[in-house]
Amino acid sequence: MSTQDGQQEVRLIGLKPFYGPVQAVMPVDAVIQPRSITAIIGPSGCGKSTVLRCINRMHETIAGARVEGKVLLGEQDIYAPGVEPQAVRRRIGMVFQQPNPLKMLSIFDNVAVGLRLEGRRRAEIAERVEMSVRAAALWDEVRDKLNHSGLALSGGQQQRLCIARAIALQPDVLLLDEPCSALDPIATFKIEELLSELKQQFTIVIVTHNMQQAARIADRTMVFMVDRSQARPMGMLVEEGTTTQIFTAPRDPRTEEYTSGRVG
Amino acid sequence: MAQAERLSTWQVVQQRMRHGDVIFWLLTLFFALIVIALVVAVGYVTWAGSAQARTTFGIGFLFQDGWDPVNGKFGALPAIYGTLVSSAIALLLAGPLGTLIGVFLSELCPARLRQPLSFLVELLAAIPSVIYGMWGVFVFVPFFRSAIAKPIANSIGKSVPLLAGPVAAGRGVMVAGIILAIMILPTIAAITRDVLSVVPNHQREAMLAVGATRWEMIRLAVLPYARAGIIGGLMLGLGRALGETMAALMVIGSFKDSIKPSLFSPGITAAALIASELPNANDDLHASTLILIALVLFGITLLLNGLARLLVWQAARGPTGSVRA
Amino acid sequence: MITQAPNYNRRKWVDRFMRGLTIAATGLALIPLFLILGYVVFRGASALNLDFFTKAYEPPVVGAAGTVGNAGGILHGIVGSLLIVGVAMLIALPIGLLAAVFLAEYPANSVATFVRFCTDVLSAAPSIIVGVVAYVLIVQRTRQFSGLAGSVALAVLMVPVITRTTEEILKLVPHGMREAAMALGAPKWRLTLTVVIPAALSGIVTGALLAFARATGETAPLLLTVLGNNNVSFNLLAPMAALPLLTYKYTDTPFPAQNTLAWGTALILTLLVLSVNILVRWATRNRLK
């Protein structure tokens, strides 16, 4: 399964998320490389999830929340006037912390939901559903119960179902917000394996509070911390680089504090 | 909310034995039992009071046409028909409208408008039924008669018997249905709003993340999730419409003898029949028959309400198990 | 490249349309509210004068030219309603209150579950049914319509309202208060009366007010029990007048002066209901729903 040609990088330029009048994170400037896994790590409250949700314009679904700055997918600013968030989410998919299969839909319908909205033909939908479920390493487990409810699956299977749902639209970027925090170690391992395979086709950004997970699967890592020197505590991007470099030779002392477990 | 620790049995007995505690417990228990007694009384009285009619007619009288007690005719079919049709009209109008209002209040309304608008909608439910009836007689029925009933009766009504004339004073089954719709609208809207607001947010996010529009999110994730609760709300609304007395009595035209084909013609509902005739009942059989109709009405609204509360209670419980509304 | 799906225009149109529809539906619901309140206020205001509040029924005066003079006032209705609802409160308040105390303070037993179920049944019962029961039990037996029969019917309607709201508010009183009193050695009856109920008092009062407002507007049960009276009467054992009954009676008469009285009565009732609802809303604004 391949995405569009010319995988594009994601560029965050002066990204500032707000909750009402309160700025939550210091301006973020970063580049996310295509066809790789970028991990976002940091202590709780540092804005990791907030920044992630800015990338597919989910942050603004919260009442009163808004975003300043730019997020470029390739050459295009997803926050440019005239760009609808709904279009952005076709190209940038998301998997959430708690597996959230749509309760009233079957497994097949869950994966197909995005495609059906777009009005694709039945044959194409069936084909793409199978492709996505296979790519999510779930096909063998659900091939006989595609019309069963998604809730009958285990937590790890549900999460893979959500991944299948997200990749069915063949997005450019796949965002995952602490996808394994509600899962047991074996399910976690399966998903980490899956992501390592999927990165050949998608640009993956994963928020995780588990440093070992970042060390295991991420090519690059962004480290966020809480900056308490301002009037209100705000998150900030402290360091960004290859995972190896972040964990073995961090440039910023705060990074070292976090990765060595002294802080956060 | 902190729960008190369960006291051990000895402590419970010890506590109860304290001077005055037993009396207190017995006192409150007594009054709680009165509540039960009230329900039993309602059931017993309607059952016993309708005995004469039940043995004389059996349940078949419900399906007999023609109510003319003076001449010994006790067919309740016109009343049943009037009740069902006016309530059906009310539900057909208030159901979709109330659901849309519930969607608006729960999903689309700006946060600071939610309370005031909900309050205004619920205010409709607080207006006494007799005022609806009076306003209907003085304001709505004349308007309906000249602006809606007559034009329709003179055009489509010529070929569709359901909408045919003559439109006399304007009172009839349809206008009663419309006023009932206004009365049950707040019930449906409030319940819909409540059951929608406990749909977990992660369902909404799942839809939005695959590129759905707001309405698609509501239609495909939120509404189906709350379906049971919404149906419960519709049933509660229907139950209210079935039992509504004064507004129906004042605008339906009190025609009890038979069923007229047109919705613009006068008719009667069960509740209105009872209210208009019981105080002046001719004889025991007359009164007993009216009480029998009351019994049937009570049974149906009980069933409807019981089922509805089950559905709403389940839906309102939400995934965390906490009860709302 | 960020592009829209091919069918997006239609979906956008549907989204806008449906969202607009929900707004329109809400607006549509408010139209009858303002129409009813508006008519009641404007037509009812013209009925308000000294005679309105101080006179009872007077036959309409038909003048020489066929014009109809005024038709008295509604004093008998005011007095009647106050008496009937007042007595109903006296009956319903102890029952509702103490039953609620039972439900809140001794919650986990099967009697309590059954009592709650009965409260639900009572609150769902159409008011006409309660009227029928009062008619059979009292009016038929005593062969007499009476204000007392009306009070009993209204009390039955009020009990579930009072029980429900009181139980809710009693449950909101923090357990810590009870435990502190128990630790000081207070027996349960004492701590309930002196600690729990005073803490819940405002909620109990709002529940009682709601029940009062609802009962004052009820007509159907009164039709079957109280019948009506043209004079001011304090005799609860005989037919009495009541405000909603007057509204009903004066709606269907051909005399405009009496129709005006109907609007006036409706205005009184509406003001009562509105003010109670606003008061209750304001008083419970901080309570989490």
Image (cartoon, grey):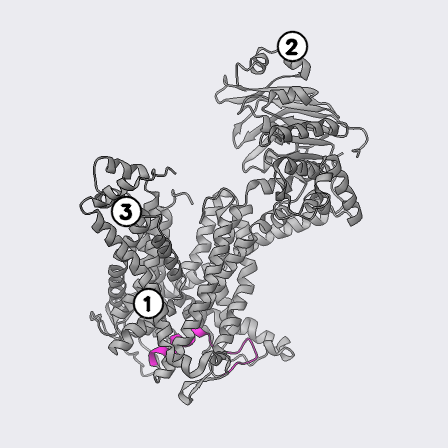
Tell me the magenta residue range. Answer: B258-280
Residue drawn where x is 64% and y is 44% of the image: A150
- Name the foreground residue: B241 vs C59: B241
Q: Secondary structure at mark 3?
A: helix
Q: Which mark is residue B301?
A: none
Q: CA distance from mark 2 to mark 3?
A: 66 Å
Q: Secondary structure at mark 2?
A: loop
* Residue C107 is covered by the magenta coloring: no
Q: Which residue is mark 3?
A: C201
Q: Which mark is residue B41?
A: 1
Residue drawn where x is 50% and y is 79% of the image: B77
Residue drawn where x is 23% and y is 67% of the image: C54
Direction right: furthest residue? A5
How many badges with numbers are in the image?
3
Which amino acid, by three-letter code, is at mark 2?
Answer: Ala
Q: Which mark is residue A249?
A: 2
Which amino acid, by three-letter code, is at mark 3?
Answer: Leu
- Name the foreground residue: B16 vs B288: B16
Q: CA distance from mark 3 to mark 1?
A: 31 Å
* Letter of the chain that mark 1 sits on in the rendering: B
